[in-house]
Image (cartoon, rainbow, N blue to C red):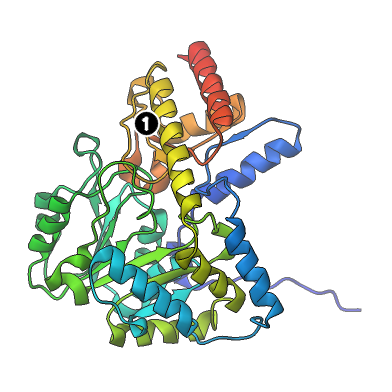
Amino acid sequence: MSRATQTELRLAKRMSRLGTETAFEVLVKARALEAQGRDIVHLEIGEPDFDTPANIVEAAVDALHKGFTHYGPSAGLPELRQTIADEVSRTRGIKVKPEEVVVVPGGKPIIFFTMLALVEEGDEVIYPNPGFPIYESMINFLGGKAVPIRLREERDFRFDVNELASLINDKTKLIIINSPQNPTGGVLTKKDIDDIAAAIGDRDITVLSDEIYSRLIFEGAHHSIASIEDMRERTIILDGFSKTWAMTGWRMGFGVMRADLAQHIARLQTNSNSCTASFSQMAGIEAIRGDQSSVDRMNVEFVKRRDYFAERVNKIKGFSCRVPKGAFYMFPNITKTGWQSKKLADALLNEAGVAALSGTAFGAFGEGYLRFSIANSIENIAKALDRVEEWVGKRL
């Protein structure tokens, strides 16, 4: 009887360049500790703790009963594409046609597909650092050159446009901007957006504008670079349903871009996911067209949590935190603790029962910071900060 032998797993070299999203890794570690009987406060994952609004759930159930359980067009159902086009036209002050919209399962496919479609080996992509880790991961995976632009605390984690201008060259293919920003909560002003457009000038450079937190603005207003006439056809807007309507598990995002590019992005969708779930798309129509009071209530609650967290954390030895203007993250500076970010995040999880992320999970320039998600109740945030304060009192 022959014995089966395991063959060597020979991965493609590009797999060694693929990163990850640390929030999910920390969540797994936290769940393992909970399985051992530990009480863990979860401030690691960027997921609203609210339920999806009832009217959206009901729209999905109704769609299931009506037979929206089959394949749909790769670019999305026509009615949803029209709804998104109308909404983006209204909120960004531009004219968007449905053929310029591609609906995908989550926001990440727009990042992935954009780079697959545009970035050749050796092309340079400028991206914010600290920033959403998938940007750098996908640039490296595709053989592009990742060019970080540092987001500095003294600028409220906004772009230094002079630094951006110095990074742009003939090899620059794509620039990624994200406002409101993950992990810092920074928000680009209208002047910032105008200055970024001026720095790009008339160069043949595409901008991927990640606006997934565009409805989560606590101070000021959201400004899209797509609203600048000269940048309109060079901008891809990334947005979606996960954050605004607490629909993370529904997996639904969208990109808005010039129609000829949208055809190629839809072709990538055909070759990967085929399409986004049809009943989810019908729920998406209700999310945009229906009652928005749930969004307003969530924002009011996030402001309360933000203000409470900032007041408390700034009293903890070694911690200092600016008050973010958007998103639902706090990004305190912990350099005065004398601890490296990863070591401190691990200690708070293992010893204090508080799950947070190291700033370095968002790039090298995140060293000296931790990210806490305030997508949790005031009671749990208070419990977490009590534990952090107690741990600091014993260890620092």
- Residue 185 x %, y %: 34, 43
Mark 1 secondary-structure assignment: loop
Q: Is residue 228 left or right of residue 146?
A: left
At 63% across and 46% down in the image, what residue appears? 28
Pick whichever, 308 or 114, lies toward us.
308
Regarding residue 133, the answer to whether it shows in the image is: yes
- Residue 387 x %, y %: 56, 21
What is the three-letter code of the residue carrying label 1? Pro
Query: Where, by quadrant of the figure, is residue 121 drawn?
Result: bottom left
Q: Is residue 69 left or right of residue 363?
A: right
- Residue 180 x %, y %: 32, 50
Regarding residue 373, the answer to whether it shows in the image is: no
Say few, some or many: other residues with alpha carbon within 10 Å of mark 1 (under 14 / 14 to 19 / 20 or more).
Answer: many
Q: Is residue 385 left or right of residue 69?
A: left
Pick whichever, 339 or 105, lies toward us.
105
Task: State whether residue 372 is above or below residue 262.
Answer: above
For mark 1, what is the residue?
Answer: 332
At 52% across and 12% down in the image, what residue appears? 394
Quadrant of the rendering where the C terminus is positioned = top left
